[in-house]
Amino acid sequence: MNEKTFGNFLYELRKKNHITQRQLGHFIGVGHRVISKWETGICLPDAANLLALARFFGVSTDALLEGHFIHTDSRAAEAPLSILTDTVFAEPEAETASGRQSLVPPPSDTVTGDYLCSWYAQQLIAKRLGLTKNRYAELRDALTAGMLFDDSSEFHPLSREYRKGLIFLVDDGWDVPFGTPSDPPNWRRFGSLLPDTERFAALGKTEESRLRGLSEKMKKLGYAGVGLWIAAERAGESPESTRRFYEEHARRHKAADIRYWKVDWGDYEKDAAYRLTLTQTAHDIAPGLLVEHCVTQQAVDQANRSPDIKETRHRLLDKLVPFSDVIRTYDIMYPFRETSTLGRAHEVFSAARENGEGERGQCLVCAEWAYFVAAALGCTVGIMQANDECRALLRFHRLSPPFGAYEAEYLSSEEVLTDSIYFEKNTDRGMKVGGRTISESAPAVMARGIPLPAVVPCGPYTPFVAASKNPKSGVYAVATFRRNIDPNVEIIAPADVSLEVEGECVTLGVFGFYHTLALIFPSDIKTPVRVLAQDLLLDEPDDVTTKVVIFGNKMIFDGIDLRCWGKKSRLYFDNSNPALLLRIEPVCAKSERSLSEKV
């Protein structure tokens, strides 16, 4: 066999069948650089790969060895893959995507645990109004009834379409007087669980009427209800017992239909027993009230005063996870948003795996504003900035709602990736990172309810990859995440990602950038299928069946195609991550029912 003759023939075969080197490599099980070496005559395939190539192209090994087609009347000699395509693909429908029903269900009133948090809006308003008090007092002063209930203010960046089922969370400042800083002498003023009299005077003269008014106002704005920031302490430290204190306030909040407690910092922030008493009391009095807990910490580990923050986190999570409705991964900062959240989510899922069944069987993980981490791993979000990625995530949650840490098996790779960036100066809020290289780490690959995806990097960097199968809806999700390697931030690191799936009909949320994405089915795909793709921000899917290549039990998507489909709604200079739905179904299922009827 002559290397040049073989290489030229392989190149001709590949071009006739309109596949790339990386696609062919994925089918055969080798890297695209190996295909390139074969085509340029640098080396030849071994016997096993030669046989795989012959089977793939539908030619004999003799034809490959001789470097030309064996003459035949079969159309397979001209384009052997056309037979394969006809076998597994349906003919594209004459109609365009226009008129198809959306793969995304309509908005629902179902509360998933997602919430829109007021804290970021408080920062925007404080800056706009020129408020300059220190120790966060200016952010609390930005929280006024007038702006909070103004539909056009910064507090409400999402249209009403996205508010259904979404909780509005009134953050730090609602229960203290104007001008209250968070220095130690003022800590005792937090934790009253009552709307401040002056701040919410327009809602009524009694504590009950102000709570009820706050809840009703938010519902009129289209939200599912209101959640409240809660200090991990009792205001004034009255002599009454902790349980008695929270019994009284849980009754008030139940009567006002408060939906969520976000328990944050305070004297007892790292006291698991205190948090347990608070939670059990809330559950006993108001069973529908979701209680969120956290491990208070700085946005990056190296900024914490305690050098053993990781050990502290692990010890506390072991105690919090079994009884918490929600665990928030806590404050994060640019550019480590995804890296930090992935690492902390890994700790929560690991704690759940090591501590048996939860007392309430829930323990959702709040990924805060790492939206595609939430999409890939079945987490809730605490929305700060309402961008396109946020909207895509909320639409995805309509068909794949968050699921608890105990509801799916968790797996993670032994390989850990580390992002590192040098900070020239401290952050605006004075976090002492200036003049230091800050690093955050997370497992390279994470999965819930499915085997770990296989990841082969196609460049110097490997992306973080996360995936899941929703135990409630059966919907799959996979995401890749950018890297931060000094001096560069948000590095797109394309890779070949392979994900195991099963079932005749498969629905998959795809987030981020790929070199190729391969779906691996349990057996060869012999039934004709139709493949639909839909940008998560649009309402019409496209038939992309002819864009997909199938070989054996593999269905391969080109990364460029995925990017185009997932950013169809974006402007040409948009730098955000693609987000799309894929729907794979047998041709016999010609019904154009909505996805909500199918999953």
Image (spheres, rainbow, N blue to C red):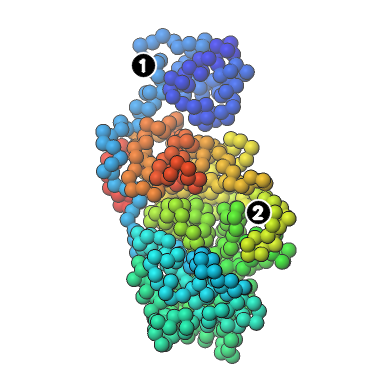
Please provide percent x and percent y for residue 225: 39, 71
Q: Is residue 437 left or right of residue 107?
A: right
Res 597 visible:
yes
What kind of residue is marked 1?
Arg
Nearer to us in this view, 229 or 377: 229
Using the image, determine if residue 293 lies above or below residue 412.
below
Where does label 1 land, which residue?
Answer: 75
Instruction: Assess disc 1: are there few (<14), some (14-19) or many (≥20) residues with their C-alpha within 10 Å of its C-alpha.
Output: few
Please provide percent x and percent y for residue 346: 59, 56
Nearer to us in this view, 7 or 473: 7
Q: Is residue 7 left or right of residue 470?
A: right
Of badges 1 and 2, the one in the foreground is 2
Nearer to us in this view, 462 or 271: 462
Nearer to us in this view, 104 or 313: 104
Q: Is residue 64 left or right of residue 434?
A: left
Please provide percent x and percent y for residue 320: 58, 69
Please provide percent x and percent y for residue 451: 53, 46
Q: Is residue 272 left or right of residue 259?
A: right
Report the residue at 51% width, 42% height from top: 513
Of all residues, the one furthest to the front in this rendering is: 130
Res 256 visible:
no
Of all residues, the one furthest to the bottom in this rendering is: 239
Could you tell me which secondary element the residue under label 2 belongs to? strand
Using the image, determine if residue 25 lies above or below residue 294.
above
Asked which quadrant contains residue 88, the reply is top left
Where does label 2 land, which residue?
Answer: 440
Report the residue at 53% width, 14% height from top: 8
What kind of residue is marked 2?
Glu
Report the residue at 61% width, 76% height from top: 182
Question: Can you tell which mark lies on residue 471?
Answer: none
Instruction: Assess disc 2: are there few (<14), some (14-19) or many (≥20) residues with their C-alpha within 10 Å of its C-alpha.
Output: many
